[in-house]
Image (cartoon, coloured by chain):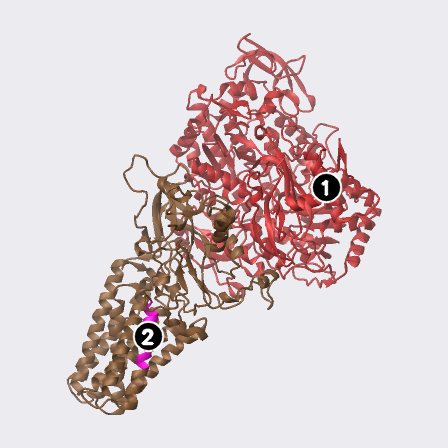
Chain colours: A red, B brown
Amino acid sequence: MNKQTKTSLDSVASYCYQCVAGPDLMRVDVQEGVPVQIRPNVDAALVHPAHGKVCVKAFGLIQKTNNPNRIQTPMIRTNPRKGRGEDPGFRPATWDEALELICGKLNEARNKGQNDESGFPRVAASFGGGGTPTVYMGAFPAFLKAWGSVDMSFGSGQGVKCHHSEHLYGEFWHRAFTVAPDTPLVEMIISVGTNTEASSGVCGVRRHADARARGVKRVQVEPHLSITGACSAEWIPIRPKTDPAFLFALIHVLLHEVQRDRLDVPFLKARSSSPYLIAPNGFYLRDPATKKPLIWDLTSDSAVPHDTEGADPAIEGEFTATGIEIGPDDKTWQHKAIPARPAFAHLVEHIRQYSPEWAAGICDVKADVIRKTALDYLDHAHVGETIEIDGREMPFRPVAITMGKTVSNGWGGYECAWARTLMAVLIGGLEVPGGTLGTTVRLNRPADNRWSSVVPGPDGFMNYPMNPTRKGEWTEVPSTRHAHQTLVPLAANSPWSQALGPTHLAWMAQKQGFENLPKPTQPDVWFVYRTNPVISFWDTGAIADAIANFPFTVCFAYTHDETNHMADVLLPECTDLEGLQLIRIGGSKYIEQFWEHQGFALRDPAAKPMGEARDFTWISTQLAKGTGLLEEFNTAINKGAAGIRLFGDNFDFSLEPEREHSVEDVWDASCRAASAELTDGAESQGLDYFREHGFRTKPFPKERWYLYPAIVEKGLRFELPYQERLLRIGQELGARLHESGITWWDRQLEEYEALPHFQNLPGLWEDALEKRYDVKIGDYPFWLLTSRSMQYSWGGNVGIQMIHEVAANIAGHGGVMMNPAAARQLGVAEGDWVKISSPTGETEGTVILRQGIRPDTLLMIGQFDHWKTPFAKDLKTPSMNSLTPMMLELTDATGSGADLVRVKVEKTTPKNGGQA
Amino acid sequence: MTRWVFLADLNRCVGCQTCTASCKHTNATGPWVQWRKVLDFEAGEFPDVSRAFVPVGCMHCAEPSCMEVCPTTATRKRDDGIVTIDYDICIGCTYCIQACPYQARFKVDRQNQVYGGGKQMGHEQKRENWSRRGVAQKCTMCSDRIDAGLAEGLTPGIDEMATPACVASCISGALQMGDLDDPNSNVSRLLAKRRHFRMHQELENDPGFYYLYEDADENSTADNPSTDPPEMAAEPAGMATISPRLQTQWDWRAAGNFAFGGTGTGLMAAAMLAGFFAPVMWLAALLAMGFVAMGLFFVWLEIGRPLRFLNVYLNPQTSWMTREAFAVSPFFGLGALAWLLDSHALGLAAALCGLGFVYAQGQVLRFAKAIPAWRQKGIVGLIVSTALCEGFGLLAALSAVAGRETMPGHQAALALAALIAWRFLAWRSYRTALGAAGAPVQAFRVLDGLRLELWHGAALALALYAALGLPGHQAVLGLAGLVAMLAGWHFKLALITRAALNQGYAINRMPARGAGQSSPGVKPGWTRA
């Protein structure tokens, strides 16, 4: 238990969790009631992985809090017509009036039934920031829980701006919602488009800085020289969206160009599916009695179930074996004395075609460079070595491969995620010290414990909560507007699953509908918090049109913005430094938060709310009261919906369910429960304690950073390289969809391969755009990409002047980046005003020349093009979101799309007076 | 002794700007005022490109050129090496800004208010610092934290509460500070085992900011400090904020002081020299004083704290601006007395003071280390010769208008021709030296675009024609004088307001990142010509 020193009266403890890489701990200095300064929390230096530091975004909170552009009273729309060109005519209202209006709409909806005629929830909610709004919305999750059926499928960037394939496949293979190197021990990282230094928060930045200081070799594979590329030992400027070829070629080198014993053969035999014999239809050959997959035991020279004690499995060769094969929907084949090869042998054969020479032409990277990268990886892998962590001996494999968005989502995401994870498996480097690690789980349960989520499943692998695809079990009628349970088995059905479904399908459905899915209705009431999909999603014009059709939208509003322009009610909530909340901290969590402690941190108000802004927990309580759900609301809080369960084996601080509780009472009870949880019920200090100390932790064993011990303890294998399960559910899903008359998802079904094939991804994009928009792709010669900015990402801070000011020090902000040679060919110079057009839209901005970008590539950092948000609307910064189409053809099987598009550039004169 | 210095490990820095933001919070600086910031460098050509992030700010130099030029002694250096500014003394002349080659100094004339609407935000109101309005401001190295920390027995650079906010907030561990004079300090130990450079070391300010760029090779005999000059890149891509930029502190008003001050003092000298040949033309002398007064008035309009202007006299030991002020005072006193007493001798004394004034003006530019086109050797001779050309030229023009000869015609013409020739040689000498030393590309473009050869040629031809004593020679001489004077103004206006690109930034070596190698640095926006 850590006890921190007493803090000064003018300093308030808080946390910054504006981005998914948090939370980080800080202090807010307050002068005569006004927050004036953010500073690191030095008291947290010993427990926080980045020594109690916060990044630049946290420093924006002072202006964010005191910003005169804030919405300061509830506001009600007076103009019933909605749209970008309509003046909403917002008028100030009292809280009573606003809440009465909202609760009236909610009660009206509830009286009609929680779900509408299409079976979709009448209430919808959208939150941005990769799940971070939860740590600012107080007890609102308890209200949603009390309400019941809520559709969260209207995304604001989920699936298209995240590591979507990594999230789904990562959780499937190694409980890795996000993936990170074991940076403190790693020697070499192949970073395929990962922008660690911009988007992995202070913990990631510090860990990698320390790694560089001890000489880590990081190779950045990316079309432009990003912040992370700048901080890497080497930069390989790969052609956009050809990453699978690069990764397949790395595997080729390891499988076909080095001695087999340089790989971690014992790991492959014991901890992977490599020895499983494959039957003729592509499914495992199984023991007829137990239905367990068979392996070929070299000791007994016979086929035995995979978990036979003392067996020495073959991973290569061909053997004659007898067994059964089980396909989709339990279709079974009997096989007698057939030739069968282990999965690994199939892999070797499958990869033979993907040589470095083959990849070189695709990736525009020399074969020698690819080969050297692979061999360097192997040289640094230390195959055979071990290390002791917390007294436990584990393999030591200090190499890792990481991936960025656009690599790890959309078409190709599966291939890349598979290849990356397989590269770790081949050298025994998955979930071991130094290697490739998962950070947290979001789809599996329990969400706060990776080890406990390791539950034995079929065939010697971990269980996974797939959405069912078997006949009779499949969700034929979706309960959400993006149909995640119907279309995406891997999305599972946890509280996070809706956000990990194909969220752009919900928007696309509003425009066009999908054959044989229920009619795409609008939600009766839509709640919006910390998100601005009219800016942050794709095809932003269509998003705005869809939102304008929603009958009743409630936005928890910071300032006016492009989405709440269409709202019916604006509610000003206490923002980061004004609200009260307790959250969990520590353990291991994305992006690189690997703590040796775990516990809780308080967000203590540093200022009185500006104007009529109200604490989110108060608003939630009033909504619960106004809808007659107070008892359910309090019960949900008691059960942990606000972040911590208020009762346990030896403590109970539950709120009285029938009574309305003050904000401080709710969090005081939470603080007491937190104290009790951390001390096994021995202590029960409440809000005052946390106000004084800011946070409270207990140790978190470092060995739990690694999944390997849990896998070994339960005698399980990682489900690689062969994807028999995916092959089966893909075929089952196809059958179900076809039985329902749905054929528009057929292309996505092709992703369910046991061993993924390379597909020409650039060609896929080019063909899709040509066919859909009847254009010649040659007229759009550039690939347009985006990149995260540490100053802006997830911050909702485009209206903060200081952020704009300091971000301007980093090249690329505020314009479109292009290579000087490409610019010369177009007759374009630094600072010129250009129009960038895709087949679907256009945006304008200034040219920023940099040598660190491929001549066939353009880059626009961040997400801009604002037309309503104060301050941001005057920045005149281009954004690719208005250029990127939402297309089914460019949606992969996990329901995600990759963030890139083909564009052309023309010099033009600025509209409305030009650049900012 | 103690010398506090900064150190940045370029292998660690990621350009996140947390230090920038932290500094802005701690010091409540106004919009776009960044005492600390991190630059984004790029070197090489696709695909062999490297990129580096380089924190900059006040380097707390051991030989601070800002302090040397400060006319008020507002800028001082503490015994522990921290360079400070006394806001209560500073007059806001911004000469220190022109002397700081690291662009570390700012002057803000308005209240801090980042959003419109006429009202400051709460924190802006609470932290408004009026003493900093209209005067020079820069990084203090958080000396208040250092002093308070030391008083509590803490160690700056180690204990966060005694450490500058930028260092304390640095998320990557790149920024450090410590005692350079202590061989066991954190910074001394790092400098002993890592290769490093200091920015613009050739300017000999002995800056107190060290940049680590790679591990020292244990087998190498090379010193850890690298003095390799960075490579000039005339047309850098995407480094507009790093490349030299036009100084904006001294505008037409400052240029007016150089133009009118030069013309006035030159005119006084010419008038008094002519007094050896004919009765002194007191109108010219009065006009000379008027010109100088006008120039000084312009400057007074430009300084941030005009009511404190007398503080300009506080630093005759090192500041040429103070010396300029000291020279101009007797110029007016003696000149006025000479006129009142009709004393040629006193007039000559005034003229000498005037020459001292214009010489000091030249030196003011020479010591403006931030501006390569000003600090170039030869600038003093160019400024003095220009002043004399202007003065003699104006006297010739006045004589032509007045219809009286202040000197025998051919002697006046020959004198003017000689001055023009001298000035031309001074210009060529200056320009050649600047070309050899290198300067911002845009400075060359401006200077070469002035076509001074044509101006000099025209004035010289006219003066020589007048020397021949042919009909109309007096009018031609007046015209020659006018051209010579306008040529001077044309040059000075451009020199002060358009050719005054600052030093910009440079990186001597691009850092090794992790297992990578360091590579040649870059000095963007510079060339030799």
Name the one closer to the observer, B40 or B38.
B38
Horizontal and vertical percent for residue B204?
Answer: 31, 55
Q: Is residue A741 visible?
A: no
What distance separates the C-alpha of mark 2 from that of mark 1?
Answer: 73 Å
Residue B220 drawn above or below residue B529: above
Give the quadrant of residue B469: bottom left
Q: Is residue B267 visible?
A: yes
Horizontal and vertical percent for residue B374?
Answer: 31, 65
Residue at position x 54%, y 67% from top? Answer: B111
Q: Chain of mark 1?
A: A
- Helix, strand or loop at label 1? It is helix
Total numbered labels: 2
Callout 2, which amino acid? Phe
**Discs 2 and 1 carry the same chain letter:** no
- Helix, strand or loop at label 2? It is helix
Q: Is residue A693 left or right of residue B334?
A: right
Q: Is residue A436 left or right of residue B259?
A: right
Disc 1 target residue: A670
Residue lying furthest left: B468
Residue at position x 49%, y 60% from top? Answer: B32
Horizontal and vertical percent for residue B138?
Answer: 45, 59
Point out the stretch of residues depicted in magenta.
B319-332
Callout 1, which amino acid? Ser
Disc 1 crowd, CA 10 A, few/some/many (<14, 14-19, 20+):
many
Name the one closer to the observer, B125 or A735.
B125
Of the residues tagged 2 and 1, which is closer to the observer? 2
Disc 2 target residue: B326
